[in-house]
Image: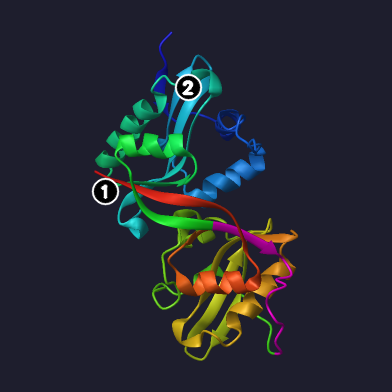
Amino acid sequence: MPYQITDCRTLEAAQLCAAMNDAFSDYTVPLSLTLEKFVTFQKQRGFSAEHSFVAMDGPEIAGFWYSGAPDISIAGRAYAVSVGTAPAHRRKGLSRTLMREVIQKQKADGATGLQLEVITTNDKAVEAYRNFGFAETRILRVCKLPADCPGLVSQDGPEPARLTVDELPEDESRFFDARPTPQNGRAALVALADQILLYGFRGSDGLLGWGAANPDGSVAQIAVRSDQRRKGIGTAILRKLGTSVGAEQLTFVNVDSNASSINAFLDKAGAQDTIQQWEMHLTF
């Protein structure tokens, strides 16, 4: 029986979650998301049911291409939230078939392209995306460090204050040396505002810096205004996040490897690399 290709508007989150767990069940570290974590995953990455497509084998999802809507914050591209095929249905061209459906919908809605991340050592996946027309644009660092940040010396001074997402500046150019990936960007913080841990320092002329983390210890952002660096602001914020999360480690996913300031700061704090990822773009 041929596969039925459809978008995800009529599918429940539980079914989409099960498909993702199945697709990554034979990885070195198998994925096992609970429904609650999957819903958070969807919110964080901007999942759009009408821009996401699956290949159905009867009542089961054989393959999927989960996607966000066109996003002006990444030059009109759409973010590929997750792409996968169930082990029993691989090598049948499902990813390419689903990508064509995604591209058709994205083009109709004005997208300029797609972007995604893939582990640099996953040679088969990297080559497949190259064959689809994607090109590498930057290397992203994934690292972790103990929540108590042993490499950072405690300093006397005020504690970071709890902030709200709407306090963050619209113009972030003075704070970031490289743009965050979508899962760590402003839209992700807004989507998870009810659970995000956000701390920073207010000054007479606006925010001096902030840090945002999820309760599981994954840090979305550490940002210090360029004229306020090397004053202990980042150290105080990172320590505050470390004592606020419910985890023994802080994890940083998708830090631009060319962003010298944040990488030097993380190295000083004792960060250890786990993997690297390519950010890849496809332009329509």
Q: Is there any visible trace of residue 70 in the rendered image?
A: no
Protein image colouring: rainbow
Neighbour tally class for label 2: few under 14, some 14-19, many 20 plus, Cα within 10 Å: some
Residue type, label 1: Thr
Which residue is found at the position 38% from the left and 46% from the top? Answer: 69
Residue sitting nearer the eye, 139 or 100:
139
From the top left corner, tell me how far across and down residue 88 is, in percent. 54, 18
Q: How far apart in space, not on screen, are marks 1 and 2 (Cα)?
A: 29 Å
Tag shown at residue 90: 2
Write the start and end of the magenta stretch as one range. 142-156
Q: Is residue 24 magenta?
A: no
On screen, 68 above or below 84?
A: below
Task: Give coordinates of residue 240: x percent, y percent.
Answer: 69, 74
150 or 34: nearer the viewer: 150
The picture places residue 184, in percent across and down from the top left corner, at: 51, 59
Residue 151 sits inside the magenta stretch: yes
Nearer to us: label 1 or label 2 = 2
Q: Is residue 25 left or right of residue 138?
A: right
> Which of the 4 quarters of the picture holds residue 213?
bottom right
- Viewer-proximal residue, 83 or 210? 83
Tell me if I can see residue 242 in this picture: yes
Position above or below: 111 against 266: above
Earlier residue among tags 1 and 2: 2
Residue 250 placement: quadrant: bottom right
Name the residue that disc number 1 marks: 112
Q: Secondary structure at mark 1?
A: loop
- Name the residue at 46% across, 30% down: 64
